[in-house]
Image (cartoon, helix red, strand yellow):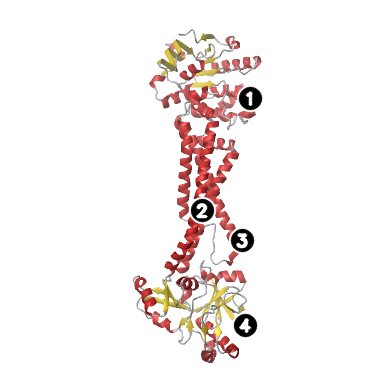
Amino acid sequence: MSLLRLALANLFASWLTSVVNVLLLALGTASIAILLLANAQLSSALSRNAAGIDLVIGAKGSPLQLVLAGVYHADVPPGNISSAEIERWQGHPRIASAIPLSLGDSFRGFRVIGTVPAFASLYDAQIADGRIWRRPFEAVIGSRMAAVTGLAVGDSFAGVHGLSDDGERHEESRYQIVGVFESTNTVLDGLIVTSTESVWLMHSRHAAESAPHQDGVASHDHEAVQHDHEAKAHAHEAKQQERDQGQLHNSVIRHGDDITLLLIEFSSPIAALTLPREINAETNLQAASPPYEITRLLQIVGVGLNWLNAFAGSLVIGAALSIFAALYASLRARRHDLAVMRCLGATRGELFNLLFVEGLLLTIAGIGVGLAFAHGGIELLSVWWGKGQAISVSGWIWAESEYVLVFGLLLAGAVAAMLPAWQAYSADVARTLSAP
Amino acid sequence: MTAEKNRVLQVEDLEFHYDQPLINIAKFDVARHECVGLIGPSGCGKTTFIHLIAGLLQPIRGHIQINGVDLSQLSERETDRLRGRYMGVVFQRLHLIPSVSVIDNLLLAQRFSRTKVDRSYAVNLLEELGIAALKEKKPSQLSQGQAQRVAIARSLAHRPALVVADEPTSALDDGNAADAMRLMRTLTAHADAGLVIVTHDQRVRREVDRVVNLGDVA
């Protein structure tokens, strides 16, 4: 019979105490693991969505709002900028690429983005079904949107103003779905991507139709910017037939219309030092750095996370103390048994190992159950939330920081087991056997 | 020479005391197959003597040899191993390990003695004691008589050279006490071991080869 078997037998013999200790440690472990997993997956999602975007250029306002609107599509933009800015910044020596984004409409909460095909390459997106857009009002939808709405290639839909479904519906200009992106685990999965011209045309038509009632002024979803597209609408309409007949080179942007923002990729790291300052100081535009703004946001949220971490840490310390108390009580109850083992030939070291192994087994079981709770819980939550979430979470992901957690918990368990083990080691056998 | 080799326990000039002199033994030997009853009034140091033989206490003076090995020459770790290998102990309160089964109590003794773990030998011992059917039971499920037999089996499970029993019959009625004594004698003889029974139970006197009064060996 091995020491491990004996240790297990001892733990099973006082199974209720063992189960309570395991659950206590599991509770602390699960709390910390959930925080670590959520933090890791949120950070990963934030980084993944901002990959390849060094800077966002848009209208003056809140830089965090600009980043949330332009990179994470979680806010309304602060305003619009002239499409003339595209060529200006595309030609800048420190800029490798400038991708225009025109926001304004949505469908069942999924945002419509007017842009160029290069936008999809920011997320390494591939077409799962169909093709990329070629003409105005052709759209490619993200995989999450396809899953949630059930829309597929060949279907059409009418967008609405703003991000809420009760906005004004553009029934006169329905989008035709010509492609579905493969899943990228980025914000792209929840977007409807079309050409910039589609957005312009949509709002030109809308402006033209609503002109008699609104004096030629159309309102966007953010309601901070008002367009006067009436004059431009005629030009769009005149060219529409010509465009519809042939392939549209939607990387070519015409002057005279507004866009919402530009996603910038630097040509060299030095640009990060000079370009934002140049834009903010010398133009009426705003430059916002996604990493900087997100770090700032996480610092604000991080205060709350630190409190949660401290609470979870106190649970773990309590659990470690509980293991110590359980082993210590067990040691007192079994002191005669341990003395008998010495009489049977067990060395002091073997008794130390026995108690130590019992403590470690409780710790390992607590960690295992805690991690199972955390990962299983997050996976269940993920299934319960369904595919409609902007940031998907998974229980099947192992965060690097969990290695540190497991190591720390093992250390705490080992320390908690050490004192009872030492008492077993140094017990006076003759005195114990003589004691009543 | 043969008589020397047959001695499994040799005690010479042994002295031990706490506050007052307690143990003072000039000579005490036990041979293989021999069954010695060690008697004396309460408080005369019988249990202390067992602890000295087992190497759990260090004598002030004198020598104790188990199977020809002088305990005073050994480190604590070596003493633990010698005790495990050559000694079997039956405790007054039995002290079976409660968390494991009857058979595992025997296998544990084999494991700590560093001898080969021999399950069939352990089962044979239980069969000879008539309790093989109880081998998977926990000690808490046994009667006092059954537990007594398990304690005897455990003391012999690793084929020791010397078995020391501390008041093994004090909790048993006459019939069970006689049975327990008979079994211990038979099994220790069968295992080629010597047997020391420490007791003040007068019933034991009839079952041993010789009786030594702890007060008389000084």
Chain of the residue where label 1 is placed in the rendered structure: B
Nearer the observer, A79 or A128: A79
Residue B187 is situated, as x and y percent measured from the top left of the image, at 57, 18
Nearer the observer, A122 or A162: A162
The circle on residue A384 is 3
Q: Which residue is mark 2?
A: A33
Query: Is A405 above or below relative to B111?
Result: below
Q: Which residue is at a point 45% across and 23% down the rendered structure image?
A: B82
What amino acid is labelled 1 in the image? Ile
Query: Is A18 above or below relative to A405?
Result: above
- The tag earlier along the polypeptide, 3 or 2, is 2
Chain of the residue where label 4 is placed in the rendered structure: A
Whether residue A286 is visible here, answered yes or no, is yes
Contact flag, marks 3 and 2 (Cβ < 8 Å): no
Contact flag, marks 4 and 2 (Cβ < 8 Å): no
The circle on residue B131 is 1
Q: Marks 4 and 1, Cα distance to the nearest angstrom?
A: 90 Å
Residue A174 is situated, as x and y percent measured from the top left of the image, at 60, 82
Q: Marks 2 and 1, Cα distance to the nearest angstrom?
A: 51 Å
Residue A289 is situated, as x and y percent measured from the top left of the image, at 42, 70
Q: Which residue is mark 4?
A: A171
What amino acid is labelled 3 in the image? Trp
